[in-house]
Amino acid sequence: MSFGMKRGFLKQTAQEPSSRPVQPRTPQVSGTCQVYSETPYIMVADSMVPSFLILPSKNDARMAIVHSLDSVQTISKLPLWNDPWPSSPNDLPFEIKRCEKGMGMFARRAILQAEVIMRERAVYVVPHRLGGTPEQIEAFYDESLAGLSPSARASILSLHNCHPETTGGSHVRGLVQTNAFPISLSHTTGKLCGLFPILCRANHDCTPNAIYSSLTDSFTAVFRAVRAIAAGEEITVAYTSLTAPRVQRQRLLSEQYRFTCSCRTCSLPAVRAGPSDARRQAIGEFLATIPEGTSLARIKLLLSWAEEEGLVDAAWELCEPGLKIARKEGSHTEAIRFGFSWVKYIRLLEGDEGLGLGQETTVSLAGVQAMLDDEHLDDLTRRFATLFPFAFEILMR
Ligand SMILES: C[S@@+](CC[C@H](N)C(=O)[O-])C[C@H]1O[C@@H](n2cnc3c(N)ncnc32)[C@H](O)[C@@H]1O
């Protein structure tokens, strides 16, 4: 358990990477790329574009990853290639259907708060920015996509492209700008993003009912319900920071995704829109730079605003400074309250995986013991961890 972890990027349960060596072969030229190795299958772009491609199984590639050669070599050793591919269960709780926003994701049945809606592996993974001339980048996009199996390629190419000016050679760039979600890797700080054939059909809402997380090193996206979703309701996620005021949110959505958001929050009458903006902005500014000497009362107020605005992510983020300040002020009851809230929100956002308890649905004493054995835990956290079983029992009722 760590109170300092970044949310949205879950760690997979620890597994040793396989030690399969990457054997360079004599490069064979293929279009703008050269074959660097066959097993795993790695192609190297020409020297002007410092990006590379790995196709884990050449003849039926389900994923293409574009990155630097050393990164691709590290990725090729991850254990995930031997893991079963996360497949979509037959009874997915939603359907993808046409709506006034194009395609959208709609609940087929009632979905419980914190329920996993879907896990899906990326089909195409790229850095946010590729080096090289526009022509080289377009050629590289095309080349990398060409390495996918026909069905994987079709699943990506059929996604919506809201940047029609990129149609043609740079269609993939438009697809990435319209659809990609961030992906996290433990060995690189560079930003990567991925295209997911099903999850990328979810539309945006400024008070969404679902949240996206990326499992570190597994190229898997997870959608989880942050509140109960009724049958027939649209399942939505956030494309932009929800603590930005409406004007800023709308500007980004219009520039990057080419739509005017008319969600319920954006359609509030002025008398309610003003306070909503002010609350979101205050939370965003506070979290960006937590001011010295913040009072417990201020954090409690911000937390109540985050709850009113339905900003589960921000509410979770506020718990950590709340806990720290309560401890500094010697208010153990408040510290425990913030601790409980932290547990409540992280379970909502990331399930039990977020607590470092693996896939278990009930608290395990072994899990708690492992946390208590962590030498970095200080006394209060240790005492708090001891309370976990009781906290869970109360929260799970
Ligand atoms: C990632 S795609 C979502 C799926 C898309 N609707 C489709 O047809 O495949 C993003 C695009 O969906 C549309 N979109 C997403 N959220 C929207 C919203 N709240 N209102 C209107 N259009 C939206 C915009 O065209 C945007 O560029």
Image (spheres, rainbow, N blue to C red):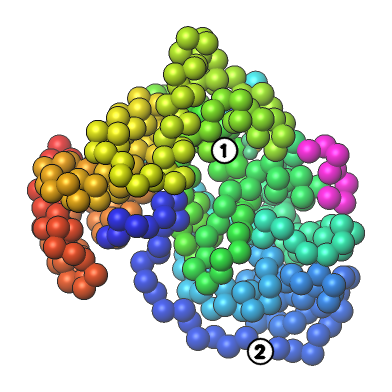
**Could you say where residue 252 lies in the image, as x and y percent from the top left?**
65, 34
Disc ID at residue 23: 2
Residue type at mark 1?
Thr
Please tell me in which quarter of the rendered image ligand 1 is found: top right
Camera-side residue: 90 or 186? Answer: 186
**Could you say where residue 65 lies in the image, as x and y percent from the top left?**
66, 65
Q: Main secondary structure of the magenta part?
A: loop
Q: Is residue 48 left or right of residue 202?
A: right
The image shows residue 240, relative to residue 187, as above or below, that is: above
**Could you say where residue 373 lies in the image, as x and y percent from the top left?**
17, 71
> Which residue is drawn at the image coordinates 26% and 38% (left, top)?
295
In the image, farthest residue toward the front: 293
The image shows residue 252, relative to residue 340, as above or below, that is: above
> Which residue is drawn at the image coordinates 62% and 86% (left, top)?
22
Tell me the residue that label 1 is attached to: 240
**Could you say where residue 182 lies in the image, as x and y percent from the top left?**
57, 52
Q: Is residue 166 left or right of residue 339?
A: right
| Magenta highlight range | 163-170
For mark 2, give the secondary structure.
loop
For mark 1, give the secondary structure.
loop
